[in-house]
Structures are given as C-alpha cells and as structure tokens.
Image: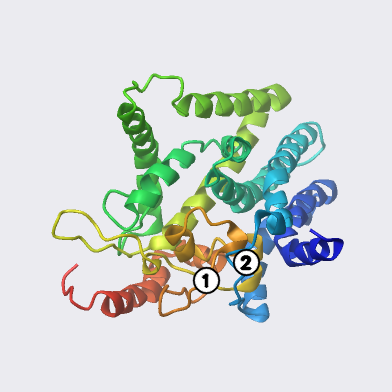
Amino acid sequence: MSDKNILLSFKSAAPFWSSILFAISLWVSFIIQGWAILIVPVFTLLILPVIDQYVGLRVENLDTNLKDSQLFWYRLITLIWAPIQFLTLFGILALTIYTDMSLTEKIGLFFAMGVLTGTIGINYAHELMHKSGKLERCLADALLAMVLYSHFRSEHLLVHHIHVGTPKDPVTAKYNENFYKFFIRVLIQCPSSSFKSETIKLGRKGLPPSDFSNPFYIYFASQFFMIALSLLIGGFFGLFLFFIQALVAILLLELVNYIEHYGLSRKSLKNGKYEFVQPHHSWNSTYKVSNWVLINLQRHSDHHFKPARSFPLLQNLGATKAPQLPHSYPAMGILALFPSAWMSIMNPRVTRWREMFYPEITKW
C-alpha cells in the first residue's frame, strides 16, 4: 500500500479504536478515585445511548472485496487489545490492593472493570474466535479466560451459529422469556452444551472426550492461571475483585445475547430440519457511535449470514431484510433489565416480524 492509502485506511479505522479511550478511562478512574470510579459504566450504559440518538445512524457499507492489507488498521486493534486488557486488569488490581481506597470504591472500580472486559473484551474475543489463525484463537481464549467464560468459544461456534433460532440453541431468547430467567438458564445450559459439542466433534475423528485436542484443557488451564494470578497479586480479596469484574462481564455478554435474537425463530421444515439462517433471524441496530465501540456487532444479521466476514466489512442490510431495534444495543440492554418495559416494546415488534416473514404460520 502507498503512504496515502495507509493514511486513508487509518482514518477510516480510527473511530473503531475508541476502545483505547475506555482503557485509559479505567486508569483515570483509579488515579482520581471518588466519583471518577463511575466514568466507564456511566458513559457506556447511560451516556453512549444518548450520544447515539444525537449522532444518528451509519448506513454506508465498505466494499466486501477489500484486501486484508487494506484492513490492517481494523485488524490491529483486535490483536493488541488482549495485552492492553491484561495489563489494565491486573495492573489496576495490584495497585488497588495496596492503595488507600474505601471498600465501596474498590468494588465500584472492578464493577467498572467488568464493563470494560464485558463490553469490549468479550466482543473482541468474539471477532477473533471467528478467525482461522492460531494467534487470533489464542488471543480470544486469553480474553475469555480473563472473565472465566472460556467455554463461550465452543458454545458460540459449534452451537449458537448452527442452531440459532431453534430450541437447540440455549442463547436464543424465547418469546416472553425475561432476561433473568434467560440468564440463569444459559449459565446452566451453555457449559454442558459447549462440552457436548466438542465431544461430538472429537467423536467424528474417532477420538474420546479426554483427548488432549479438546480445547477444554486450554479453557481450564487458562482460567486457572487467571485465578492463581489474582490470588498471588491480592490474596482472597484480590480474587473477590477479579470475580466481580468477571460476573459483570458475563452479565453484559448475556444481555447482548438476549437482545440479538429475542423471539426470533427459524422455520421448521417437513424433513425435520430447519431453514438456513437468514438475515431476518437477528435483531440489528445501525447507530453510528455504538457500532464503533462494538466493532459493528450490531450488524448482527450479516455476521450470522457470513460468519467469517471481518467486522469492518459487515453490511447494513436494511429493515426489509434484517429487523431493526428501536435503539442501540447499550440502550436495549438497559431496557432488558426491566422485563415489563422490554416486552411492551419488543413483543409487538416480534409479532410484526412474524407477520412480515412468516405470514403462513398462524400459531407459534
């Protein structure tokens, strides 16, 4: 690439580097303390949805034929995030243990840390796990181990993408299922479904579940390392703070899972199988700023339609092909915490979705 093209590529990718500001904000929170502990959660969960409404939508698409060299700056941020998050998480943990802060401030700081590792870290892990390269998979595993949710890679690739919109997918939220019921259900079902999927995959190769190619060995080892490191740095209180951020991160991940497919189902065919996954099987949002922060996660229909497509190339498909949410994922995540309000807004949309895409089905 010429210097001019490199500059243009960086300029195009720059808004997606906003995650760096979130990591810096965590360090600022630690340094200032007090009210500053709330910077990241307040901005992410409250201010970002307001900014989205003000800045508006981003409907333009990049050319899907762009070469990897032209996507260098997009790819780079996902590759460097794991070490940035690791240093932020364990660096602040080490300093917090020996800093004169109140218990409330320390807990609040690691609640904020969970917003960072859940909003950005798991999202980047999601992008990386869809790549075939060993480096990308290793970085994804490292990010998931930091929140003690390593099985998400197996569950997402081998269960969710195959069975989305069917009863076999634990993370497709059912119509009229509130978030809290959904959250408890996936915490129970996903670890077992992910292990079962890996067992079936090994069985096709004639290998037992105990074979060392089973990624659950990596999952357990990497999570054990993160737990041991937390204990080494801060003892049981350090582990307690580490668990707080992990729980918040997992909660935010499953909030997004809940939003992405709520009430949407694939049609059962006469042969007992289900129709192929289509763009109308995922909820989308085209708000500009939150798509920068979430690296186009809200273009979720195209992700399921073309799972290997890199995040900058995900397409905005429009309301006639992909159902649109009234607000961004962060705003809808807050709404999902209030089941009555969520269902009053989303259930009519699910009904209209059914009438639009499956008018022949009168009973669900």
Report the amino acid beneath label 2: Ser
What x and y, as percent, mark residue 90? 72, 34
| Vertical arrangement, residue 9 with respect to residue 142, above or below | below
| Vertical arrangement, residue 235 with respect to residue 242, above or below | above
Observer-nearest residue: 273 or 363?
A: 273
Is disc 2 placed on a helix, strand or loop? helix
What x and y, as percent, mark residue 143? 61, 40
What x and y, as percent, mark residue 173? 35, 57
At a point 36% along the width and 28% down the height, the residue shown is 202
Mark 1 crowd level (few <14, some 14–19, many ≥20, 10 Å Cα)? many
Q: Which mark is residue 356?
A: none
Residue receiving disc 1: 285
**Does the residue at mark 1 contact the one at mark 2 (Cβ under 8 Å)?**
yes
Q: Is residue 104 visible?
A: no
At a point 36% along the width and 76% down the height, the residue shown is 349
- Quadrant in which residue 147 is drawn: top right
Report the amino acid beneath label 1: Ser
- Judged left or right of residue 26, residue 301 is left
Observer-nearest residue: 75 or 106?
A: 75
Residue receiving disc 2: 290
- Judged left or right of residue 46, residue 271 is left
